[in-house]
Amino acid sequence: MTAQTWIDRTRDLLLSGTVETLNRLDVDINDSVGTIQVEFETGPIVPGSIIEIGTELMYVTNVTSKDNIGVMRGYGGSTAASHTDGDVLRVSPQYPAHMILDALNDDLADLSSPRNGLYQVKTTTFTANSTLDGYNLAADAVGVHQVTFTDKDDSLSEPEVRRHTIRRNRATDDFASGVALILFDTPTPGQNVRVEYTAGFTALSATSTALSTTGLHSEAYDLPPMGAALAIMSFKPIARESITHQAPMRRSDEVQSGAISASIRDLRFRRQERINAEAARLHVLYPTKWLRSGR
């Protein structure tokens, strides 16, 4: 699964069954061409409308035919990009993909904040050195779960280094990342040391980015779309509760007072329950260990 999976899921939560107007690109384009062709009749694609391909928004300047649509590229804070014949084109998207992608990354950061307490576990290894008690640790390290060492000739033996600590803002001449792992129980020189450390989740860089690169466990893949939808809903109501989501426009009395707030509240509650469940699962997988810091 890729970031596009989360974008689609977020959009589904926001649209609540509302069907968007779609078309398809009918020719390959680079990131600078000013005219495009579409496969089907232009319909609502008119001068002044907005279309979306991938995460790029385009402002329609003129329409001669479906084979000659003038566009302004990279509209509304999006980035112009190359696109391929057959790519789906959204007409006047209510929730642009680049906005959803930003909201997804914001939610990944929020999930790994101290308030929510979720994290990914990474590993690094190095060889014990008798002249060192401090070793460079990755800049994204938040905490250390476990430090073990193995004899080069006996990989099945993994004694644990129980006394250690992290020190930050170290001189980069000594520790390239500025983060140092200090071991107070020093393994025998030459032994392989393995460190399991916690870190925040990794942001998505593009719609094609694999979800696995975020570090979020697959059991929690439902969380970022909920968080992104909540963030977007906070300033733009979901489609089924908008008085403008259908044509003709919905009357204001068709949308019950407080309905939007109720939807946000319900989704927020469901997300928090899922965060709590994921935190409990992480606690089982990586139980807290005590008496780990040294002098």
Image (tube, rainbow, N blue to C red):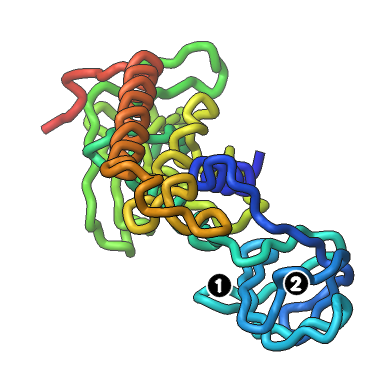
Farthest left residue in view = 295
Q: Secondary structure at mark 2?
A: loop
Comparing labels 2 and 1, the label whose residue is closer to the camera:
1
x, y percent for residue 11 = 55, 47
x, y percent for residue 170 = 24, 57
Q: Quadrant of the N terminus?
A: top right
Label 1 belongs to which residue?
78
The answer to whether any part of residue 131 appears in the image is no
* 204 w.r.t. 76: above or below: above
x, y percent for residue 3 = 60, 47
Q: Is residue 111 left or right of residue 97?
A: left
Image point (63%, 50%), residue name: 209
Q: What's the mark number on residue 245?
A: none
Q: Is residue 161 left or right of residue 128?
A: left
Label 2 belongs to which residue?
82
Quarter residue 118 falls in: top left
Q: Secondary structure at mark 1?
A: loop
Q: Nearer the viewer, residue 96 or 199?
A: 96
Image point (50%, 29%), residue name: 217
The answer to whether any part of residue 150 appears in the image is yes
Q: Amino acid at mark 1?
A: Ser
Image point (88%, 68%), residue name: 26
